[in-house]
Amino acid sequence: MDALPYAHRLSPFSGEIEPEGVYEWLHFDGSALEDLDGESSRFSESAFSSVTFTGGGYRRSRFDDVWLNAVRMVGTDLSETTWLNSECSAGILAGTEIHSAGMHRVVFHGCKFDSVNLRGAALRDVAFVDCLLRDVDFGGATLTGTSFPGSTLDGVHLRKATLADVGLHEAAGLHIASGLEALNGATISSTQLLDLAPALAQVIGLTVRDGAGRP
């Protein structure tokens, strides 16, 4: 955290998060935030360390230049939020609603996503580094310049998603539960192509048969 350009400005957070609140140059440290209503709030140049969000709603909130480390979000509503120039490390997101959110220049490092809803979200220049994405739903989302180096995608949904310059070739594991047709616009490795070949053939209606016999 000391490397943050605004670290010298941070002061410990005290009080309550409220709707439409403005939170700047604050350090949220070890807090347990349960079922709070922070709708339409703005968090800027702030840090979250070992904070647990349980439930709660932060719909339409904005996160600018925010640093999060070892943060847990369980059943939290972050739909329609905006994220810019932010980083999340070693976080756990479970049952989190982030649908229709906008993310630009955001990095997730070593995070675990379990049953996270990102439907309709717009991700631009977002990186998932060494993350686990299990049952994550990108349905109808737009991913541009998004990469997944070292990450495992397990049962990810891409139905009706739009991909452009998306790098999946460095992912450690790639299992697409639905929406294989959305991979147009993504880069995958030759090994991943072989693994996906049977499912891709089924999507395009291609019959594969070895040996003699009628087609």
Image (cartoon, rainbow, N blue to C red):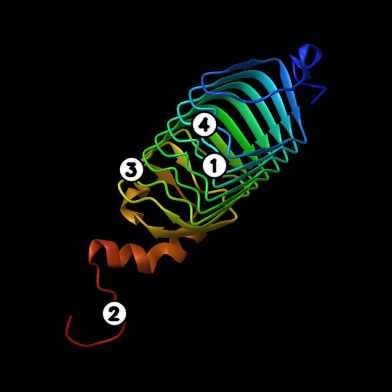
Residue 98 as seen in the image, left or right of residue 46 = left
206 versus 109 height, above or below: below
- CB-based contact (under 8 Å), mark 2 and mark 3: no
Residue 115 as seen in the image, left or right of residue 204 = right
Callout 1: SS: loop
**Sequence-earlier tag: 1 or 2:** 1
- Cα–Cα span, label 2 and label 4: 53 Å
* Kind of residue at disc 2: Arg
In this view, the mark in front (2 or 4): 4
x%, y% of residue 17? 62, 25
- Cα–Cα span, label 1 and label 2: 48 Å
* Kind of residue at disc 3: Gly
In this view, the mark in front (1 or 2): 1
In this view, the mark in front (1 or 3): 1
Callout 4: SS: loop
Instruction: Name the outermost residue toward the top.
Output: 9
- CB-based contact (under 8 Å), mark 3 and mark 4: no
**Sequence-earlier tag: 2 or 4:** 4
Residue 76 circle label? 1
**Sequence-earlier tag: 3 or 4:** 4
- CB-based contact (under 8 Å), mark 1 and mark 2: no
Q: Where is residue 100, by image quadrant?
A: top left
Between residues 18 and 140, which one lies in front from this camera angle? 18
Which residue position is annotated with label 4?
Answer: 58
Q: Which part of the image, by quadrant, shows the N terminus?
A: top right
Image point (34%, 62%), residue name: 200
Residue 140 circle label? 3
- CB-based contact (under 8 Å), mark 1 and mark 4: yes
Instruction: Name the outermost residue toward the left.
Output: 214
